[in-house]
Amino acid sequence: MPREPARTGGSAALAGLRARLTVPVLAYGGILMAVMQTAVVPLLPDLPRLTGSSAAAVSWTVTATLLAGAVLTPVLGRAGDMYGKKRVLLLALSLMTAGSVLCALTSDIRVLIAARALQGAAAAVVPLSISILRDVLPPERTVSAVALMSSTVGIGAALGLPLAALIVQYADWHTMFWVSAALGAAGLALAWWAVDESAVRHPGRFDTLGALGLTTVLVCLLLAVSQGGTWGWGSVPVVALFAGFAVTLALWWWQQLRAERPLVDLRLAARPRVALPHLTALLVGFSFYANSLVTAQLVQAPKGTGYGLGLSIVGAGLCLLPSGVIMLFLSPVSARISLSRGPRLTLALGAVVIACGYGIRILDSRDLWVIILGGAIVSAGTALAYSALPTLILGAVPAAQTGSASGVNVLMRTIGQAVCSAAVAAVLVHHISPVGGLLLPSLRGYLLAFAMAGAVALAGCAMALAIPGSGERERMGRLPRRPRGEQAEDELRKGAGEA
């Protein structure tokens, strides 16, 4: 609920501090989410030895987080619309922190996989936070705040990898998870103190059958995509999973159209102003992920390949660090472009910039400074695109469904990243050459991966330009006011007067 008006000087100062910290605290949560997803990457080569398990089992520490995040993002987004976005946000942060503690306490690969699945709940933090920002901020501040919130995904990914690598290199590997747990606990406490509960609700009975159906659909799809290269794309399990995906998707779609209170409003999602941003999110997620995925492998390749730089995992992480800084500083620029020209143009521009970054990578991927420059340009385009996507969604759906719609948009990014991982792996596997007794990807394979990601980015640009406009509101990137009650309206008018 909105805060009561301050009646004393001390309470007024405290209320003002909480209001000023709302956006930074939510952004901190978004950065934590991305850090949790990348923190385990430096450990992957050593985890089989540390846990006494196989490399195939260790890969599930990544797959479990991906699956859990994909399933919980739309489910928790819908729950936030129904039961309160702050309440569900605190639940997601609690699950993330509990997963970190469990990871820090175990060396059993089975427990570690389960704990990583708990950490996957953090994927719902960004869409829930975007929905909260729409409900508690005045319209003139919402676009810039949402732009920052959406950019935290790339910022956290760029910061998390070198930080985790440094901890793993100089301390016991459990220390990394203890640090993650401490950061998560701090984020949970700050969110409980600084963030207001939204008064905007979409009550009704939770669609349990729809949630189970969506879970089945996503598990079949993402498991097939993430494990296809290992199990074989023509293997019985992968073919069965794709068939299960098609069948369960059809059944789930049928059920959602007939449900009184569906988990996902498919009629709303099928409208061009909602469907096209979702599809663009998938394409941008694909093109963005190729940058960090391929760059990390390329710079760590041995110098004997003729193109590799032989860097450590820490060095590879530091190569991505400038990208995170750029995304942080570009989020307000993106907001200004959206306010003046509209989020559609910002999204299309971001996709073009991503393609230009990959063009630089194709021209030269041997010199470190060019690699960093190309990656930074890709991140700049990603910052523009990611910050515009939620603005488009929020401007096209009712206020009471922002959590669910934002969750679906983030889910589409996740699916794009999973498909990118499989596609890049397939390209690199088919372009290998022997180096020092090892079979390693050739430079041609990396260049083809860059070309593929750039082409997908250009397809995203075309998709963005096809999104229907909505007159003056869309051009200015403004969001409609939320129905928050008389007291909330008074606070907005007071804030506008003080401004």
Image: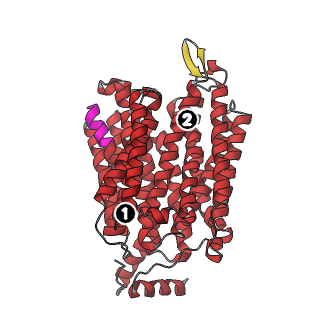
Q: Amino acid at mark 1?
A: Arg
Does any portion of residue 107 appear in the rendered image?
no
Residue 387 in the image: x percent, y percent?
A: 57, 60
Side of 335 relative to 25 (left or right): right
Whether residue 113 appears in magenta in the rendering, the answer is yes
The residue that mark 2 highlights is 423
Does any portion of residue 262 appear in the rendered image?
yes
The residue that mark 1 highlights is 258
Magenta span of residues: 108-116
Magenta span main SS: helix
Is residue 433 shown above or below 292? above
Q: Residue at x 62, y 34 (%)?
A: 449
Q: Amino acid at mark 2?
A: Ala
Side of 174 relative to 269 (left or right): left
**Quadrant where the image shows the C terminus:** bottom right
SS label for mark 1: helix
Q: Specify few, some or many for label 2: CA neighbours under 10 Å numbering under 14, 14-19, or 20 or more.
A: many
As drawn, which residue projects farthest toward the right? 363
Q: Residue at x 56, y 67 (%)?
A: 144
Whether residue 158 appears in magenta in the rendering, the answer is no
Whole-number angstrom distance, CA of label 1 to CA of label 2? 36 Å
Residue 145 in the image: x percent, y percent?
A: 52, 66
